[in-house]
Image (spheres, rainbow, N blue to C red):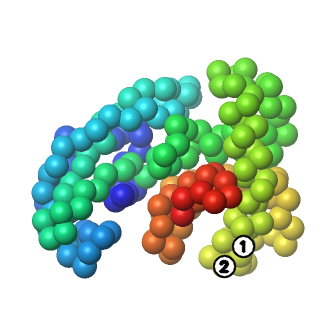
């Protein structure tokens, strides 16, 4: 996957991309740089926030192919979580509502039209991995990271800079989306 952190799910346009956009982009599979051709697109459903509402719509994801190794790569918007239905903004909205604002899960579920099971799943996985997320912040910004790593303080760390946070993780660790690693649960993709 190749991330475009200038695009989000609600601004993403597959037709925006041309070959020139990838002139300095390295291939994730081989050492070639900028050797891509347009390869088509595919449709995937995602939940994202638009006009203060959670939207569930399909978006067309651009695909490119490396001319050197013939591998294909999806060009993803910066707030998408690979293999997940909810975008990063929606997940963060749920975490902040439940942990930072202390709203009950059923109230959050009713407000956003989601099932309480989906919300509880994300909350539970976040709780399981919160010490790792806290450690990530201690390594990248030690002065701003509180000593305790309870759910509220860790969720508060990522309250504002969602895309900056995700971009930093991707660049630092050269892995897909930060949240996909933690939200896949034990034994998940990394």
Farthest front residue in view: 187
Residue 124, above or below 153: above
Cα separation between marks 1 and 2:
6 Å
Query: Which of the 4 image quadrants contains residue 174?
Result: bottom left
Q: Quadrant of the N terminus?
A: bottom left
Q: Give the number of the disc on residue 139.
A: 2
Circle 2: is it few (<14), some (14-19), or many (20+) Cα within 10 Å? Answer: few
Residue 118: image location, x then y, percent: 68, 33
Query: Which of the 4 image quadrants contains residue 11?
Result: top left
Q: Give the number of the disc on residue 161.
A: none
Residue 113: image location, x then y, percent: 65, 21
Residue 164 seen in this snapshot: no
Residue at the image point whose x is 50% and y is 58% from the top: 177
Residue 116, above or below 70: above
* For residue 43, side relative to residue 185 (left or right): left
Residue at the image point whose x is 50% and y is 75% from the top: 172
Q: Quadrant of the C terminus?
A: bottom right
Residue 143: image location, x then y, percent: 72, 78
Q: Are marks 1 and 2 in contact (CB under 8 Å)?
A: yes
Circle 1: is it few (<14), some (14-19), or many (20+) Cα within 10 Å? Answer: some
Residue at the image point whose x is 77% and y is 46% from the top: 124
Q: Give the number of the disc on residue 135.
A: 1
* For residue 176, side relative to residue 136 (left or right): left
């Amino acid at each position: 996957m190749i991330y475009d952190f200038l695009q989000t799910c609600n601004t993403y346009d597959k037709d925006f991309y041309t070959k020139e956009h990838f002139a300095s982009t390295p291939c994730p599979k081989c050492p070639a740089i900028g050797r891509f051709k347009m390869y088509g697109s595919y449709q995937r459903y995602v939940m994202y926030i638009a006009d203060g509402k959670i939207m569930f719509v399909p978006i067309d994801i651009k695909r490119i192919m490396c001319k050197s190794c013939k591998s294909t790569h999806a060009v993803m918007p910066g707030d998408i979580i690979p293999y997940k239905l909810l975008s990063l903004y929606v997940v963060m909205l749920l975490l902040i509502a439940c942990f930072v604002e202390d709203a009950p899960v059923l109230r959050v579920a009713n407000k956003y039209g989601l099932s309480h099971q989906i919300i509880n799943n994300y909350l539970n996985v976040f709780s399981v991995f919160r010490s790792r997320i806290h450690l990530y912040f201690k390594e990248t910004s030690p002065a701003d990271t509180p000593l305790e790593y309870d759910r509220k303080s860790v969720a508060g760390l990522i309250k504002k800079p969602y895309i900056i946070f995700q971009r930093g993780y991707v660049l630092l660790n050269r892995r897909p989306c930060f949240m996909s690693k933690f939200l896949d649960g034990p034994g998940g993709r990394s």
